[in-house]
Image: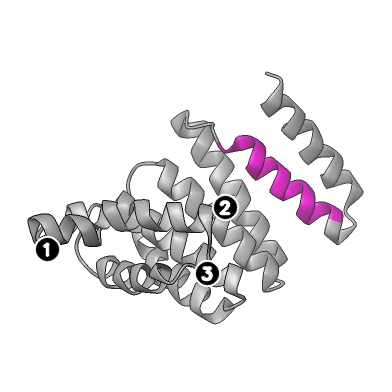
């Protein structure tokens, strides 16, 4: 982004910059979370999150911020991001991949915070949203997360049910 700004000047359109921030965080998250530029993008993502941008883009930015903070072990910061975006997720009238991804990350955060019932509710909401919308790309991961939670709680019956659902999602 710095090279683009040097050549063409600063980006004046927040909708475009939000997508660039999303892409930058995606690359940095996948490549190296300790890259010095990630802090700049995390700060900018927070600023963009507060703007009235496309809801899906804001939810995606929130997902990367949550992932970043969970990875860093900063659960209070991840919770703050989740709580900030939760009303947007609830208000969005249509299911989207961003919403389902948010619920998956919310599950992770809730599980790490030992909010097991809330975590399972997030998974079930994500699966229901996927079923209603036809956005099924995260089904296996969501079912796998449910399996993990049931196994951790020692709930063998619900674990078996989740494993069967996982298998059906992989082999329709």
Report the magenta stretch's main SS: helix
Q: Residue furthest top?
A: 172
Name the residue tied to disc 1.
Answer: 10
Image-based side of 77 in relation to 84, left or right: right
Q: Quadrant of the C terminus?
A: top right
Is residue 146 a member of the stretch shown in magenta?
Answer: yes
Determine the residue positioned at 85% across, 60% down.
153
Residue 56 in the image, given as x and y percentages of width and height: 32, 49
Circles 2 and 3, Cβ within 8 Å, touching? The answer is no
Label 3 or label 1, whichever comes before in sequence order: 1
Determine the residue positioned at 41% across, 47% down.
98
As drawn, the label of residue 153 is none
Coloring applied to the structure = one colour
Label 1 or label 2, whichever comes before in sequence order: 1
Residue 58 in the image, given as x and y percentages of width and height: 32, 58
Q: Which range of residues does the magenta coloring cover?
A: 138-151
Residue 138 vs 18, above or below: the answer is: above
Near-viewer residue (138 or 127): 138
Distance CA(mark 3)–CA(mark 1) = 25 Å
Name the image quarter holding residue 60: bottom left
Name the residue tied to disc 3.
Answer: 34
Image-based side of 19 in relation to 104, left or right: left
In the structure shown, which secondary structural element does the residue marked by tag 2 occupy? Answer: helix
As drawn, the label of residue 104 is 2
């Amino acid at each position: 982004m710095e090279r683009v700004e040097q050549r063409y000047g600063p980006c004046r359109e927040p909708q475009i910059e939000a997508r660039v921030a999303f892409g930058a965080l995606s690359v940095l998250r996948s490549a190296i979370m300790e890259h010095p530029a990630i802090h700049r993008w995390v700060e900018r993502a927070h600023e963009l999150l507060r703007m009235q941008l496309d809801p899906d883009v804001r939810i995606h930015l929130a997902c990367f911020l949550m992932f970043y903070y969970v990875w860093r072990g900063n659960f209070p910061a991840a919770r703050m991001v989740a709580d900030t975006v939760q009303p947007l997720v609830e208000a969005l009238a249509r299911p989207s991949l961003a919403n389902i991804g948010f619920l998956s990350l919310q599950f992770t955060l809730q599980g790490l915070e030992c909010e097991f019932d809330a975590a399972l509710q997030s998974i079930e909401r994500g699966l229901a949203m996927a079923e209603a919308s036809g956005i099924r790309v995260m089904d296996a991961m969501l079912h796998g997360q449910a399996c993990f939670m049931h196994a951790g709680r020692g709930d063998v019956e619900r674990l078996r049910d989740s494993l069967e659902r996982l298998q059906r999602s992989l082999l329709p």
